[in-house]
Image: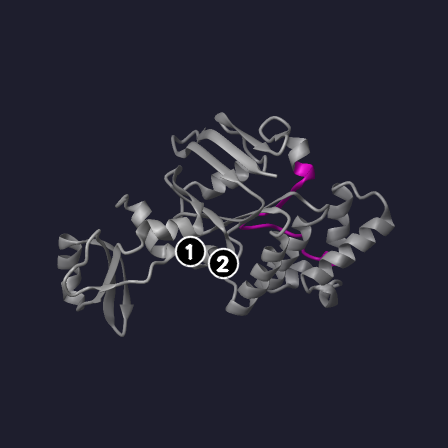
């Protein structure tokens, strides 16, 4: 199954052009959607999730017309927004039971079986009777994935899911997502570029509502292979280097900037840098290629 997005456009009433002729084909598996804040990632997620209409264009999930048949989409969709609310004194098991009922599981025994499997899957079984509002950030996100998976969805959307999580919780969360992605379309919207490299076989970079790159993560790296050079410089030299070269990024290493520069040819005094998706991200944002 594929999610096919063609020429989708969306403008808000305040004049913001959130989606500008967006076209993507997203296969089964983990798909990374990266971009800076305000790039249009959440607008695209909300449109796919039937929470807002597009002004024009089309979206299909298999044989489902996403923009016209919202009920059909919602039956096969799992959605974890960046922020989601819970009833403050409701336990995880009771809340999932209510959500499963809304998803169409009328049989109490069927709901019980599904909920137990999900809570075990996300490692929350021991905490099933605790109020979700008492959970840590990582536990809440794992609960969010559990509610996403009710009804075995064909499409799962997670929007900035690891903000505020410690490294152990991030790894646990992503292990769950990777397992889901073996048989499901999983769209991971994030600003953490390295997560996309580690998890996703396909990706898109978006900014100002436009798709700047879409394709295989390995192909993205091939585009910059042999074209990224690095050098450690003094702080006071940074402005001059930014003026003289196409500086992709800089970060402090041992108190001094380590700069990455884009160039088709070697540069005296620079070493060849190992290609990474963060370089691709900044190169595309700055439209260097």
Identify the image's colour scheme: rainbow, by chain, secondary structure or one colour.
one colour
| Mark 1 lies on residue | 193
Please state the horizontal and vertical placement of residue 68, each as a whole percent of the image.
61, 26
Question: Any magenta on residue 92?
Answer: yes
Residue numbers of the magenta segment: 74-93
Q: Residue at x 58, y 38 (%)?
A: 2
Residue at mark 2: 163
- For residue 224: magenta? no
Query: What's the magenta bit mostly, secondary-structure-wise?
Result: loop
Figure quadrant of the N terminus: top right
| Mark 1 neighbour class, 10 Å CA radius: few under 14, some 14 to 19, many 20 or more | some
150 sits to left or right of 8: right
Q: Quadrant of residue 207?
A: top left
Residue 114's x, y, as percent? 78, 53
Q: Which residue appears at 23% of the width and 66% of the height? A: 257
Q: Is residue 61 above or below residue 263?
A: above
Secondary structure found at label 2: loop
Quadrant of residue 206 in the image? Answer: top left
Name the foreground residue: 80 vs 89.
80
């Amino acid at each position: 199954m594929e999610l096919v997005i063609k020429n989708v456009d969306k403008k808000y009433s305040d004049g913001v052009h959130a989606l500008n002729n967006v076209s993507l084909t997203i296969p089964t598996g983990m798909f990374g959607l990266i971009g800076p804040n305000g790039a249009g990632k959440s607008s695209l997620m909300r449109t796919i999730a039937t929470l807002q209409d597009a002004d024009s264009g089309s979206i299909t999930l298999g044989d489902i017309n996403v923009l016209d048949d919202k009920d059909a989409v919602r039956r096969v969709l799992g959605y974890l927004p960046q922020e989601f609310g819970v009833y403050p004194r409701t336990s995880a098991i009771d809340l999932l039971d209510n959500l499963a009922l809304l998803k169409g599981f009328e049989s109490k025994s069927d709901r019980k079986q599904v909920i137990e499997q999900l809570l075990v899957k996300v490692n929350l079984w021991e905490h099933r009777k605790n109020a979700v509002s008492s959970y840590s950030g990582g536990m809440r996100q794992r609960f969010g994935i559990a509610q996403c998976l009710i009804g075995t969805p064909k499409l799962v959307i997670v929007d900035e899911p690891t903000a505020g999580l410690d490294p152990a919780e991030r790894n646990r969360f992503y292990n769950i997502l990777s397992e889901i992605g073996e048989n499901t379309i999983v769209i991971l919207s994030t600003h953490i570029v390295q997560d996309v490299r580690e998890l996703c076989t396909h990706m898109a970079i978006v900014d100002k509502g436009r798709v700047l790159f879409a394709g295989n993560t390995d192909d993205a790296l091939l585009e910059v292979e042999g074209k990224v050079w690095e050098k450690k410089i003094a702080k006071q030299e940074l402005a001059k280097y930014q003026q003289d070269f196409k500086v992709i990024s800089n970060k402090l290493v041992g108190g001094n900037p380590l700069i990455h520069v884009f160039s088709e040819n070697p540069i005296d005094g620079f070493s060849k840098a190992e290609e990474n998706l963060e370089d691709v991200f900044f190169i595309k944002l700055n439209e260097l290629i």
